[in-house]
């Protein structure tokens, strides 16, 4: 979803400790815009924090710490095949990763870095190479 489609602006809400680390780090990246993630269709109910690079969504963190990261289909397929993320059932352009403890923070930031670099023009082929290098057995 594009930034202009997300509704009114509000700063990102506080999140559970591990997810808050991810949120704070993402908000510090060059040109990243952080804001409230509203419950779909209801701008009165906060559902987490959104992160954008320009008008393009990098992903969001829900209040329960679940990260939804925009990867595009080729990278999503590689991540899921490598056991590095779960598929997002509502869109083939996203993956899911739970952020509950410290090791989750580092991995979530790695996933968001893929999304960030993709939006900055790094090729899918190069990003998929990164996935293969990090592959879990």
Image (spheres, grey):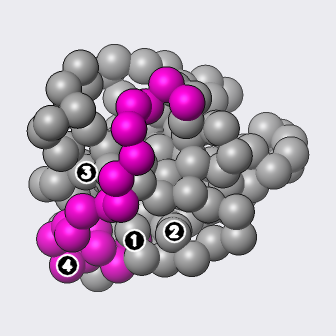
The alpha-carbon separation of the residues under discs 4 and 1 comes to 9 Å
The alpha-carbon separation of the residues under discs 3 and 2 comes to 14 Å
Q: Identify the residue at horizontal 64%, vertical 38% (top origin).
A: 56
Residue 112, how many percent across, how many down?
Answer: 54, 57
Q: Which residues are magenta?
A: 4-22
Q: Which residue is mark 2?
A: 26
**Label whose residue precedes the other's in the sequence (2 or 4):** 4
Q: Residues within 10 Å of mark 2 (few under 14, many from 20)?
A: many
The alpha-carbon separation of the residues under discs 1 and 2 comes to 6 Å
Element type at mark 2: helix
**Label whose residue precedes the other's in the sequence (4 or 3):** 4
Above or below, 126 against 92 in this view is: below
Q: Which residue is mark 1?
A: 22
Q: Which residue is mark 3?
A: 48
Q: Is 20 inside the magenta-drawn segment?
A: yes
State if disc 2 and disc 1 touch (CB < 8 Å): yes
Q: Which residue is mark 4?
A: 17
């Amino acid at each position: 979803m594009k930034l202009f489609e997300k509704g009114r602006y509000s700063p990102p809400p506080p999140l559970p400790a591990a997810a808050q680390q991810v949120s704070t780090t993402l908000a510090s990246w060059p040109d990243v815009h952080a804001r409230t993630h509203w419950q779909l269709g209801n701008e009165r109910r906060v559902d987490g924090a959104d992160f954008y690079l320009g008008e393009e969504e990098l992903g969001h963190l829900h209040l329960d710490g679940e990260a939804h990261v925009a990867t595009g289909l080729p990278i999503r397929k590689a991540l899921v095949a490598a056991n590095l993320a779960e598929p997002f059932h509502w869109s083939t352009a996203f993956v899911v990763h739970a952020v509950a403890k410290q090791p989750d923070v580092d991995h979530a930031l790695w996933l968001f870095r893929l999304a960030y670099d993709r939006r900055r023009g790094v090729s899918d082929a190069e990003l998929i190479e990164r996935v293969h290098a990090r592959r879990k057995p």
